Amino acid sequence: MRPWLLFLLLIAGPALAEPADIERVPALVRGGAPHLALYLIDKNQPGPAATDDWIAWERQRYAVYFAQRDWEAVAARAAALPDGVPEEFHRWVRTQAAAARLHAEDGNGARRILDALVLEGEADRAAVAQWRQMMIRSYLIDDSLADAQSAVLRYQQDYAVTDDSWRLLHAQLLMRMNDNRGALGVLAGILSHEGRLLTQLARLRSRAQGPRAVAVEADKLIHATRNKPALQFQAWALTAEAAAMTGEHLKRVIALERALTLKREHGASDRLYLVDSEDLWRAYVRYAEAEGGKAKLPADQNAAWVRKAEAFKRDDAVNARAFYAYLANRARQPDTRALAHARLADSLAADGREEVLRWLYVDSSRYPALDDVPAAVRYRLLDKAIAVYDIRFAADLLAGLHAPPPQEDADRWALKRARVMIYAGELGAGLQALSNVLVDKEKLDDDLAERYIQVMFDLQAADRHREAAVLLESLFGLVDNPRMRREILFWQADSRAALGEHAQAAELYLRSATYGGANGGDLWGQSARYHAAEALGKAGMTADARSVFQRLLDYSGDPRQRLLIERQLQQLWLLEQKPTTR
């Protein structure tokens, strides 16, 4: 944040706070701030003695955990339930814990909780029915299909079940057991998107309907579920399966790419809609072979296949990808294979499909270890991992990648490596990389210096202020841009202040305020002066601090800013009186 912006925020004063309201929690979650929602809960939830209010806030806490998919937090919270809560709520919490284990693909862990709940025999019939359905889901997770079937039969004997959720669960079991026609009977009349998808899948696999007719319905469901990613995954997987049966190779390639884009987050645990990286590799090759055959491309002339791939227009990038995948697998020359891997990676990245790239290379039996993944692909995956702060994955990708990618400047590559190392906790290696960038340099261009400063912020965030201060001091001597030098002084001061070296911090803030002949009256200068005065006060130099604050009053006509400065002057006066007060 620019110091002048921070200064404006400081002088604006606190906004009027709204009363704490439990209804603000789901709004914060929907707005993408679950940690703020948890802060609000922690701040406002009363003690367990205030039973009803405490329970209301506690339910919201679990809702936040589920929104975050933080299943371990659910388990930890459920295990620490305080004594004396009503038994009904105690059962509700344990039900949430069982549901979390199901989401975490821990069928056995869910059953341990559910078995205890059922055996207690104190809940109403509806709750027991819910737990028994969850038990069936736990068997499906563990692929214990015989146990699931036995549980279904017992459930049907005890309950007259007609609701859609039960029928969907029953149909999933039947389809897992390859009884697709039986599933069609169970699914009859269910009009939800999930029910329609399962119905089409059962029709396809039972041959009750032709693949082209299923594909038409799948296209409708792709459109209808566009805002529901888990169902979108299923719709694309269904389309891919139908396309395999009709021999529509390009359509299958497109559908598999879309499904794999969604799979990790929304379909990784799906046992019915099955797509994997090997499916896409084979689909790429089959399409390329079919098109190459039409074009009469000689199988042993790789250059002709490369030219064919390059001839596709940008809108036909998926077609080109198939040819590059073919060459990556079939080309005899290592250089051609390396080129194909790089082109495939570049094309997927250009279309925002780095997730597909990850499936093809990292989550693939073809490449058992990251060291086996071509360097060009690792560079592309690294860029994406850094962009989304997947730091552990980025650090793994970096291992062994010492040289920069083609056409990338070595210093910029070193800064990228340093940034990942700092975030990954490998501070020694990160600091060494940062130092190496400055070695034997007489000058840094503005772009590299800006990038260097960004990594300094990362270093400060990691609380390595001493190293940051030293590196910033070295950087100061290697740039000649007055604006940048002024900023570097300010960031140096921030690190010195964080180290408790307040006198040095004050000097650096004041140098920043007036650097390059500035009079310190602009917003940057005012902010730097304000921070300098604070640092002087902390250093015990209250007279100097008062002098800097007084000069700030000369520049400020804003009543709120003047009030803030006057309050600081009052605090300084009180500080000066302390030694003489008895």
Image (spheres, rainbow, N blue to C red):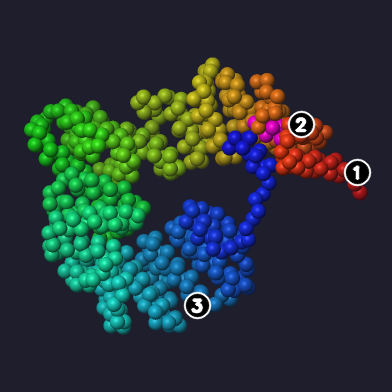
> For the magenta stretch, what is the residue range?
524-530
Q: Examine the residues drawn in magenta and state their main secondary structure.
A: helix
Seen in the picture, residue 4 relative to 256 is either above or below; the reply is above
Verify CB contact (< 8 Å) between mark 3 and mark 1.
no
x and y, in percent, of residue 10 in the image: 67, 42
**Residue located beneath label 2 in the image:** 554
**Residue located beneath label 3 in the image:** 88
Per the model, the C-alpha gap separating discs 3 and 1 is 62 Å
Residue type, numbered disc 2: Asp
x and y, in percent, of residue 433 in the image: 49, 29
Q: Is the N terminus in the top left, top right, bottom left or bottom right quadrant?
A: top right
Along the polypeptide, which appears first: circle 2 or circle 1?
Answer: 2
Residue displayed at 17% across by 63% down: 203
Residue displayed at 59% across by 74% down: 51
**Closest to the observer: 69 or 161?**
161
Residue type, numbered disc 1: Thr
x and y, in percent, of residue 183 in the image: 21, 69
Along the polypeptide, which appears first: circle 3 or circle 1?
Answer: 3
Residue displayed at 63% across by 39% down: 6
Tell whether 546 sits left or right of 451.
right
